[in-house]
Image (tube, helix red, strand yellow):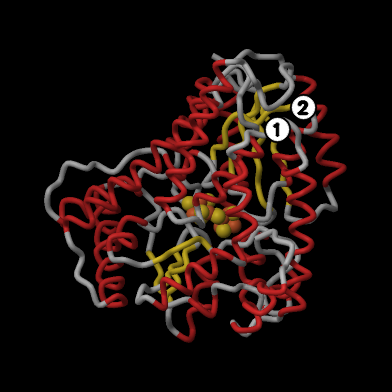
């Protein structure tokens, strides 16, 4: 999203019917944050240049790429959640990316019609659509929402009024009856994408898409393995940029570039070249996702004596943990394997959700986190209430934690910095592995 707008971009946005002046103002504001919180940081791996480019190109080159693919016959699908089975979209030849908003600038446009006390992620996303500044809206052949929280599911009702919307019904539990419901949802989703594209889902193409997504997940997991090192060769802020790019970039190109970044990280780790000062305290961030445009909490932690070594979120481990079983030879078996893998995601929309607490405690151990920052977006009731059980589970395991509730504005940044600095100061230093 951040991008110093070029005259060509202005022409592109005009061609798409966007509010060119407002769009340029929004991007200027996000660019300033990206430069200040990410690009100006010292000690960044050279391979980050590619991922910075993905962020910069998200309202320019990537839009042109989507337009070119559509012109060649592909359908474009916008998504909002990591429960959307990407393998099916890939196998059926669509181009897809996540449209979640991470900027405060568009929120007032949502608040003109929607309640103010909704989470900033939903309001920012809505604001992009309602202010005529999302370059992907005019290109969308289908948007895919999901019933993860009340704000989202009612928002889809409004956005989907004119059609072109598919809502995935997520169960709230993970019992056999819930698994059956979810499997049927994935089958229905498959039929909807088949109807959209006019193609029948082919087993070989689906198997190829499963292998591609698993390769992408392995590359992300490998990047995270380097974060377990004593001196992590990549900062948490840069790892977040990679995760944000994962949600919008072409999966194959992304994976190739991540594999080459991983080679650089291996060399840096071998020579003990860390991205942050050696005395930085190792922090796990748990909770809400930080989507493109939002680097606030990572920046605060890493300028307060901390090093974010892992994110227990959808812009972290929740996106890539668990591979799809590649062994089924037929299409139905693969669809079932896909449904099973996505149902292992431990979003706070599930109740009860004991596996999330167990996973966070395990990860804090694996990454040798000295403490956990629970990151909750304002009005995100599921993560906010679940923060109680999470704090209890961490305490029982002897892991200190702090909960912060915030939004996308910079107004509370000073106050957050004071709280986080004091928390980090209170932690004992822990070595990596
Ligand atoms: S699987 S975390 S991407 S829903 S922060 S909109 S939950 S009120 S973003 Fe999410 Fe899917 Fe879950 Fe992940 Fe609602 Fe909370 Fe807002 Fe959220």
Residue 210 or 66: which is nearer the viewer? Answer: 66
- Residue 341 in percent (x, y) is at 31, 45
Q: Secondary structure at mark 2?
A: helix
Q: Nearer the viewer, residue 254 or 168?
A: 254
Residue 173 shown left or right of residue 309 in the figure? left
Q: Is residue 346 visible?
A: no
Residue 238 visible somewhere in the drawing:
yes
Residue under circle 1?
Answer: 402
Work out whether 413 lies above or below 368: below
For disc 2, the marked residue is 423
At x 79%, y 33%, the residue is: 303
**Whether label 2 touches label 1, CB < 8 Å:** yes
- Marked residue nearer the N-terminal end (2 or 1): 1
**Left or right of 354: which side holds 30?**
right
Near mark 1 (Cα within 10 A), the count class, few <14, some 14-19 or many ≥20, is some
Question: Which residue is at a point 57% across and 64% down the rendered structure image?
Answer: 61
Q: In percent of the image, x 52 and y 35: which residue is there?
A: 261
Residue at figure coordinates x 65%, y 46% from the top left: 376
Query: In which image quadrant can residue 46 be found?
Result: top right
Give the vertical position of 345 relative to 80 (above or below).
above
Residue 402 drawn at (x, y percent): 70, 32
Gap in Å between the C-alphas at discs 2 and 1? Answer: 7 Å
């Amino acid at each position: 999203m951040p991008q110093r707008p070029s005259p060509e971009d202005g022409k592109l946005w005009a061609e798409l019917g966007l509010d060119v002046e407002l769009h340029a103002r929004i991007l200027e504001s996000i660019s300033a944050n990206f430069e200040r919180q990410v690009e100006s940081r010292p000690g960044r791996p050279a391979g980050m240049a590619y991922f910075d480019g993905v962020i910069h190109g998200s309202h320019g080159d990537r839009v042109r790429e989507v337009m070119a693919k559509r012109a060649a016959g592909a359908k474009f699908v916008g998504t909002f959640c990591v429960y959307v089975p990407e393998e099916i979209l890939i196998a059926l030849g669509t181009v897809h990316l996540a449209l979640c908003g991470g900027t405060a600038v568009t929120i007032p446009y949502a608040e003109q019609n929607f309640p103010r006390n909704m989470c900033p992620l939903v309001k920012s996303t809505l604001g992009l659509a309602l202010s005529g500044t999302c370059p992907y809206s005019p290109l969308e052949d289908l948007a895919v929402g999901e019933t993860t929280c009340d704000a989202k599911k009612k928002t889809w009702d409004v956005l989907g009024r004119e059609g072109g919307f598919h809502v995935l019904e997520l169960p709230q539990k993970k019992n056999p009856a819930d698994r059956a419901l979810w499997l049927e949802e994935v089958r229905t989703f498959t039929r909807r994408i088949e109807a959209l594209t006019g193609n029948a889902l082919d087993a070989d193409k689906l198997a190829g898409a499963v292998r591609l997504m698993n390769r992408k997940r392995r590359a992300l997991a490998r990047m995270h393995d380097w974060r377990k090192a004593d001196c992590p060769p990549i900062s948490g802020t840069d790892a977040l940029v990679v995760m944000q790019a994962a949600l919008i970039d072409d999966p194959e190109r992304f994976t190739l570039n991540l594999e080459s970044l991983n080679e650089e990280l291996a060399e840096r780790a071998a020579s003990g070249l860390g991205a942050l000062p050696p005395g930085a305290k190792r922090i796990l961030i748990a909770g809400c996702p930080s989507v493109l445009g939002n680097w606030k909490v990572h920046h605060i932690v890493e300028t307060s004596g901390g090093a974010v070594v892992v994110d227990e979120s959808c812009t972290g481990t929740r996106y890539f943990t668990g591979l799809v079983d590649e062994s089924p030879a037929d299409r139905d078996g693969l669809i079932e394997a896909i449904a099973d893998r996505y149902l292992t995601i431990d979003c706070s929309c599930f109740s009860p959700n004991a596996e999330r607490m167990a996973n966070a405690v395990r990860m804090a151990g694996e990454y040798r986190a000295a403490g956990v920052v629970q990151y909750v977006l304002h009005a995100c009731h599921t993560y906010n209430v679940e923060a109680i059980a999470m704090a209890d589970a961490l305490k029982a395991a002897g892991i200190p934690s702090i909960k912060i509730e915030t939004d996308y504005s910079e107004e509370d940044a000073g106050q957050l910095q004071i709280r986080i600095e004091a928390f980090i100061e209170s932690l004992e230093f822990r070595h990596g592995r």
